[in-house]
Every structure is written in structure tokens, then in C-alpha cells.
Amino acid sequence: MAARKKASASTAVVETPAIPESTPAPGSKVDYDAAKHIIINSKVYDRESFTPEQVQQISAVNYADQHIASAEQDLKIYKYGRDNMVKQLLEDITAVEPIGTVDPPAEGE
């Protein structure tokens, strides 16, 4: 698309840069394409608009997100295993006579 010319009231001609048809207005809704776009805080960005440093930052955040998700999954597995081990232990010690009781610890102890 060629640059458009606008005529003002005094008939002066002002050059306006051409805007490609495919470029949405800032803040408008766009069709998300994972190959072309990145979403940050519900805002869609063109991948090609980032500097190399920003691309590194995005990669670091993605790396951290993947490891956090993996750690959370591991934690669920550990908790499940622990709960089952405690259950088995409680079943196994029914024949052992306790020597007394204590108050449960206060929350946070």
C-alpha cells in the first residue's frame, strides 16, 4: 500500500506513512498465532518486535516456568507417597503401645 497524502484546511500536503493492512491497531483484538505472537499479561506482541535481550528474558521466564511446573508435579508425587507411607506406618504400629500423649504443635511450629 502506498503512502497516503492528507490535505489540511490550508491545502498543504502532509505525508502519512503507509500502514500494512495486516497490522492491527494498538490495543485491538487479534487472532493469536503461536508462531508469530507472544502473550504477556493478556497482551499480544509480535515476536519480531523484541530485541535479542528481551528474547533472552522471555526464554529465561519460560525456562523458570517449566521448572516450577516440574517441581510442583514432583511435590504432588512426594506428598502422595508420604501420605501413603504415614498411612501404612499407622496401620503397622497398632500393636505398639504408646507411652503418653502431647498437645499438637501450634500452627506454624
Image (spheres, grey):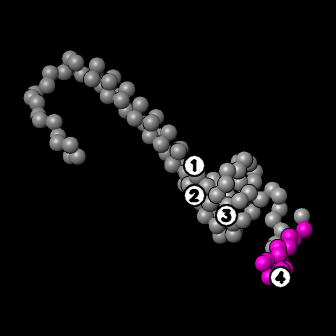
Q: How far is the residue under mark 3 from the one under mark 1?
A: 17 Å
Measure the C-alpha gap from mark 4 to mark 3.
43 Å
Please give left or right for residue 100 compared with residue 22 in the image.
left
Per the model, the C-alpha gap separating discs 1 and 2 is 9 Å
**First in sequence: mark 1 vs mark 2:** 2
Q: Mark 2 or 4 closer to N-term?
A: 4
Q: Which image quarter holds the N terminus?
A: bottom right
Tell me the element at label 1. Answer: helix
Residue that label 4 marks: 12
What residue sits right under mark 1 in the picture?
Answer: 66
The residue stretch that appears in magenta: 2-15
For the question of whether residue 23 can be seen, the reply is yes
Going by the image, does 85 lie left or right of 74?
left
Give the residue furthest to the top: 95
Residue found at x 67% / y 64%: 55
N-terminal-most mark, 3 or 2:
3
The one of 39 and 12 positioned closer to us in this rendering = 12
Say if 4 sits above or below 45 in the image.
below
Whether residues under marks 4 and 3 lie with C-beta atoms below 8 angstroms apart, the answer is: no
